[in-house]
């Protein structure tokens, strides 16, 4: 009997070990356009012109993020043309942020319109795969109220201007044309979307990276938001348990959730493909102000160490940066980040980004060493494009 018990326990132990192996984090070995073993510094360039691409290369950026919150090029030829413009400055086009329109997908109220948008979404994913652009950042926020702020001209260090969110300054009684939604509806819509597009992303070699709700609150103006906590993301990523169903880890948004950033990186990091490197003071419940990258409530050095520890090899970009009013007046309409409707300190002006990239490059050299943490080890090369 004792021998039988030992055999049963042994088999149960083997079975449990196999189950643990099957449920272990899904890690990306390498992206199609990069074979290095460190993250890289990327940037949105507003506008995406030769002047800003030259500036990006000069300050140590290696990768470009094509940004448009309303739409994106839908053919490989269009994407390859943008990619070649970036490569002329030694920059790698690694991400499309915003992605195809998905207002109908998120709301899920008209199946015919939903299915039409999903087919277009699949087309764009396939185009990205053909163009060898591996990361698609998107969000699942209601289209009529996505990123929310109550001011875009809050003075911070030295008179720089930034944005803030305060419930006391926000009218939550307003309702949009989208009406009201429930969390149950939103989760059903997300499941329907993911089960259709993730298999296409797997075939195309494209990694989907969903951005948290900003601000991460349960409802805004009657519209449910479902990605407002680490637990929400675990649920979302488990709908389709694939490395191609991943996350954009916006450190600012996660900090707004009131959780520890390094701990949460270690919790979710194996499914992260894209990082927004920004910070705040405060939280979504009581209100917050966006800060320079070096003076928020997160220990950014420890955060980058956590990305190293989880083996992250994706791209990290400075997200919202303060406006430096003595050097820039804010963007003209045609120069703003496309589809991102904001006020004066939009977070997407260029001068503040120079400081942010310099700060990040210094942290990279501290955490990864001078050679591996330098842009020469991460920049575009023929070897990384094979």
Image (cartoon, rainbow, N blue to C red):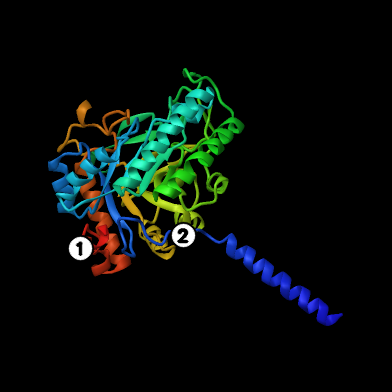
Q: Is residue 8 left or right of residue 20?
A: right
CB atoms of marks 1 and 2 within 8 Å? no
Nearer to me, 21 or 141? 21
Q: Which residue is label 2 attached to?
A: 27
Comparing labels 1 and 2, the label whose residue is closer to the camera: 2
Work out whether 292 lies above or below 112.
Answer: below
Work out whether 97 lies above or below 2.
Answer: above
Q: Is residue 291 left or right of residue 198?
A: left
Please tell me which residue is depicted at 41% across the width and 31% down the height of the picture. Answer: 148
Dot 1 or dot 2: first in sequence order is 2
| Label 1 environment density (alpha carbons within 10 Å; few <14, some 14–19, many ≥20) | few
| Label 2 environment density (alpha carbons within 10 Å; few <14, some 14–19, many ≥20) | some
Please tell me which residue is depicted at 52% across the width and 22% down the height of the picture. Answer: 110
Q: Position of residue 253 (x, y in %)?
A: 43, 43
Placement of the N terminus among the 4 image quadrants: bottom right
In the structure shown, which secondary structural element does the residue marked by tag 2 occupy? loop
Q: Position of residue 275 (x, y in %)?
A: 37, 50
Q: Which residue is label 1 attached to?
A: 376
């Amino acid at each position: 009997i004792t021998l039988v018990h030992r055999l049963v326990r042994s088999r149960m132990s083997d079975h449990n070990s196999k189950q643990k192996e099957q449920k272990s984090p899904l890690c990306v070995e390498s992206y199609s356009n990069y074979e290095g073993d460190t993250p890289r510094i990327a940037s949105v360039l507003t506008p995406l012109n030769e002047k800003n691409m030259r500036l990006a290369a000069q300050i140590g950026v290696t990768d470009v993020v094509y940004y448009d919150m309303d739409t994106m090029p839908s053919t490989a030829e269009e994407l390859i043309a943008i990619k070649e413009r970036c490569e002329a400055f030694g920059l790698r086009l690694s991400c499309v942020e915003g992605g195809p329109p998905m207002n109908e997908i998120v709301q899920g109220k008209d199946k015919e319109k939903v299915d039409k948008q999903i087919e277009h979404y699949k087309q764009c994913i396939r185009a990205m795969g053909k163009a060898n652009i591996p990361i698609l950042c998107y969000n699942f926020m209601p289209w009529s109220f996505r990123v929310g702020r109550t001011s875009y001209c809050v003075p911070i260090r030295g008179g720089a201007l930034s944005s803030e969110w305060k419930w006391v300054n926000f009218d939550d009684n307003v309702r949009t044309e989208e009406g009201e939604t429930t969390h149950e509806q939103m989760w059903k819509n997300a499941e329907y979307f993911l089960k259709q597009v993730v298999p296409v992303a797997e075939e195309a070699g494209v990694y989907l990276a969903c951005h948290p709700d900003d601000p991460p609150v349960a409802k805004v103006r009657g519209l449910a938001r479902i990605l407002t906590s680490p637990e929400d993301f675990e649920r979302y990523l488990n709908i389709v348990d694939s490395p191609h169903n991943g996350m954009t880890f916006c450190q600012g948004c996660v900090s707004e959730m009131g959780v520890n950033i390094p701990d949460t990186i270690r919790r979710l990091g194996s499914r992260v493909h894209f990082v927004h490197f920004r910070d705040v003071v405060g939280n979504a419940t009581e209100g917050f102000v966006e800060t320079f990258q070096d003076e928020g409530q997160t220990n950014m050095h420890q955060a980058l160490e956590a990305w190293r520890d989880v083996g992250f090899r994706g791209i990290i970009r400075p997200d919202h940066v303060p406006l430096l009013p003595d050097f820039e007046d804010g963007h003209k309409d045609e120069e703003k980040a496309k589809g991102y409707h904001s006020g004066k300190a939009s977070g997407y002006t260029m001068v503040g980004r120079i400081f942010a990239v310099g700060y990040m490059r210094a942290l990279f050299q501290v955490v990864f060493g001078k050679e591996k943490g330098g842009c020469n080890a991460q920049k575009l090369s023929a070897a990384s494009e094979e």
